Image: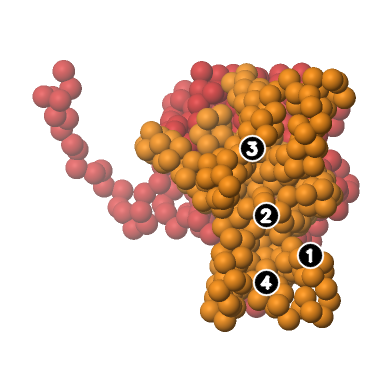
Chain colours: A orange, B red
């Protein structure tokens, strides 16, 4: 890793820490950084209301945004490496569309389900169905693209498009048949929100994100070698098929869980790796951790804006990520388009 | 020692054989060069040694053991392959690409030995000034030198066992000076006790640098041995379908081949008067 890359990592981490402090402080009850640290360390520099707000509401929500952001951004960087395509993101393996279809299914059926299985189970049914849908779609994409023990990346790309088209059609059908209330929650889910963040949600992401994330970060050499092509990666002692399978499964699990809990938050997986690639280069040893930090920072900031801009209403976070990130992305693109190389 | 025994290989089971009954041995200390016309099976031969294609008929042995059964990671520590086409997606720097050659040698972070091997390879290929450049902004020849440096870095170091370096048309995109510099280095590298097998198109460069030349045509071995034994008019004519005249190199005691289309008479070509206006 070059000195510039190290510097970018350190600076991003500092920005992330500042954003976390801001996120903890912003909202109806103000919590200055000093009070927040005092809550964490069990000091005396805060009042009980601040402690309750931090521990029950903000801490789970901020941690959730960090985990979700890291999962989406690293998932994007990993898919770009596996598919050797800078336009790839986790949705390419059907995660978002599969989750979307099953979430729509659960939302539309909730009315009839809640009388049958109780309201508690009905609220859980959306994330459960969505997670199942994400894994199911990825499995489908894999099964189509597989011949023997090898997976063809081009076939996988096309299979992803086909599966996305199919699941989107079903989502459209369900949307069409939804009632007005269902439609509203459906649209809110599709645009993404961390509004449902609680300790249960946090525990789910703590179970689903860190391990796959660590696995992908460790594969930086293999993912770099894949950029040379699979035969050359094999000459460098890597096992491309095993790595591709492992990284796709890890991505499906962590982004599937994220999408299931927070809805579809587009743009993070595509743009965060791009920004860091333009800033510090393509080496995954740097790019993967940088994407993790950057994704966490972006989602933390976006969620803070989402819940404070239009109090007491809450904006969909997907709208914020697109509104903040797209101009940055466009600026970088316009500045560097002459030297930009797409695969 | 690399030994190929009776290799026959079909691209598809019902199609014609790409290689027919090819046997060939390369010893440590030897730069072996494979020549022959397009479609002779040169790249296929290299791919069989590189493990890209499964050996179905015949065997590829490395010091007596079946090369294709050796563990891939261990093998990558002493066998490096330069493919005929080298393209890399994304803007890696030259140094990062060369470091990829060291991937078989470390798991998380490169050791001082790995860093040293990368520096040596960069220096050797004259790339140290370009080390921090995005490889996709370089010229074709500079990119090719980067990939060669990657292969050189891969089997650098105090390995007890000899290395195996396989290069498919390594001179692609290189200028004349770099062509000679690379071949001289490959010859010296082989003489350090490694096995080097390179596919070349330039018969005369093969004659000048190879310890050993293998002439392939239509999947068969036409000739195999030191350049003066292989580069004979009859064998060259049979392989390439051209008239071949073998003379001596003006500076060196190696053969130098002149080709001409078949059927051309021995009459001298009309002399071209140089345009003196262009040559001051």
Say which label, 4 or 1, has the lower sequence index.
Answer: 4
Query: Front-most of B211 and A212?
Result: A212
Vertical side of B199 occupied by A99: above or below: below
Mark 3 — on which chain does it sit?
A: A
Q: Do tags 3 and 2 sit on the same chain?
A: yes
- Which residue appears at 75% of the width and 42% of the height? A57
Q: Which dot, 4 or 2, sits closer to the camera?
A: 4
Vertical side of A122 occupied by B60: above or below: above
Left or right of residue A331: residue A288 = right
Q: Which dot, 1 or 3, sits closer to the camera?
A: 3
Mark number, residue A335: none
Mark 1 — on which chain does it sit?
A: A
Q: Which residue is mark 4?
A: A107
Say which label, 4 or 2, has the lower sequence index.
Answer: 4
- Which residue appears at 58% of the width and 47% of the height? A312
Q: Spatial distance from mark 4 to mark 3, Cα to Cα?
A: 30 Å
Q: Spatial distance from mark 4 to mark 2, Cα to Cα?
A: 14 Å
Q: Which residue is mark 2?
A: A262
Q: Which residue is mark 1?
A: A124
Q: Which residue is mark 3?
A: A28
Say which label, 4 or 3, has the lower sequence index.
Answer: 3
Say which label, 3 or 2, has the lower sequence index.
Answer: 3
Secondary element under disc 4, as helix, strand or loop, is helix
The answer to whether marks 2 and 1 mark residues whose Cβ atoms lie closer than 8 Å is no
Query: Front-most of B151 and A30?
Result: A30
Q: Residues within 10 Å of mark 4 (few under 14, many from 20)?
A: many
Residue B152 point in image, percent of width and height: 66, 30
């Amino acid at each position: 890793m070059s000195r510039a890359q190290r510097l970018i990592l350190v600076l991003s981490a500092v920005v992330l820490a500042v954003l976390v402090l801001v996120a903890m402080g912003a909202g109806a009850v103000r919590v200055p950084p000093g009070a927040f640290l005092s809550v964490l360390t069990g000091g005396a520099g805060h009042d009980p209301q601040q402690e309750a707000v931090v521990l029950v509401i903000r801490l789970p929500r901020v941690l959730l945004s960090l985990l979700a952001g890291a999962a989406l951004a690293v998932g994007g960087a990993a898919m770009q490496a596996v598919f050797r395509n800078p336009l790839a993101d986790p949705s390419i393996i059907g995660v978002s569309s599969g989750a979307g279809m099953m979430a729509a299914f659960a939302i539309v059926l909730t009315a009839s389900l809640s009388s049958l299985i109780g309201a508690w189970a009905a609220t859980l049914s959306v994330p459960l169905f969505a997670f199942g849908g994400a894994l199911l779609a990825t499995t489908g994409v894999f099964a189509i693209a597989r011949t023997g023990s090898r997976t063809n990346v081009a076939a996988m790309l096309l299979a992803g498009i086909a599966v996305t088209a199919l699941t989107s059609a079903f989502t459209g059908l369900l949307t069409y048949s939804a009632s007005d209330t269902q439609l509203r929650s459906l649209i809110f889910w599709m645009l993404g929100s961390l509004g449902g963040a609680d300790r249960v949600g946090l525990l789910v992401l703590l179970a689903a994100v860190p391990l796959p994330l660590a696995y992908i970060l460790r594969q930086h050499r293999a993912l770099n070698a894949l950029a040379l092509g699979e035969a050359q990666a094999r000459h460098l002692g890597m096992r491309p098929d095993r790595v591709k399978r492992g990284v796709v499964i890890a991505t499906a699990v962590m982004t599937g869980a994220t999408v299931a809990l927070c809805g579809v938050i587009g743009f993070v997986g595509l743009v965060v790796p791009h920004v860091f690639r333009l800033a510090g280069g393509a080496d995954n040893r740097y790019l993967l951790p940088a994407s993790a930090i950057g994704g966490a920072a972006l989602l933390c900031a976006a969620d803070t804006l989402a819940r404070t801009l239009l109090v007491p209403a809450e904006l969909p976070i997907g709208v914020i990520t697109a509104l903040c990130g797209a101009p940055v992305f466009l600026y970088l693109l316009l500045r560097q388009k002459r030297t930009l190389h797409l695969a | 020692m690399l030994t190929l025994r009776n290799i026959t290989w079909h691209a598809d089971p019902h199609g014609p054989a790409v290689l027919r009954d090819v046997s060939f041995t390369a010893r440590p200390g030897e730069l072996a060069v494979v020549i022959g016309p397009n479609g002779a099976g040169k790249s296929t031969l290299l791919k069989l040694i590189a493990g890209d294609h499964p050996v179905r008929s015949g065997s590829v042995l490395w010091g007596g053991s079946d090369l294709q059964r050796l563990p891939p990671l261990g093998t990558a520590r002493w066998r490096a392959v330069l493919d005929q086409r080298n393209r890399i997606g994304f803007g890696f720097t030259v140094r990062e690409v060369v470091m990829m050659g060291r991937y078989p040698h470390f798991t998380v972070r490169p050791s001082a030995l790995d860093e040293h091997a990368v520096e040596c390879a960069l220096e050797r290929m004259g790339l140290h000034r370009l080390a921090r450049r995005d490889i996709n902004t370089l010229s074709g020849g500079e990119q090719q030198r980067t990939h060669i440096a990657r292969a050189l870095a891969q089997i650098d170091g105090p390995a007890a066992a000899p290395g195996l370096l396989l290069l498919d048309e390594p001179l692609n995109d290189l200028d004349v000076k770099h062509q000679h510099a690379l071949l001289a280095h490959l010859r010296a590298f082989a003489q350090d006790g490694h096995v080097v097998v390179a596919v070349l198109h330039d018969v005369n460069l093969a004659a000048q640098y190879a310890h050993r030349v293998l002439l392939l045509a239509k999947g068969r071995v036409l000739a195999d041995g030191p350049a003066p034994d292989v580069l004979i008019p009859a064998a060259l004519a049979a392989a390439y379908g051209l008239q071949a005249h073998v003379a001596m190199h003006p500076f060196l005691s190696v053969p130098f081949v002149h080709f001409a289309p078949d059927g051309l008479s021995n009459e001298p070509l009309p002399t071209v008067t140089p345009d003196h206006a262009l040559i001051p």
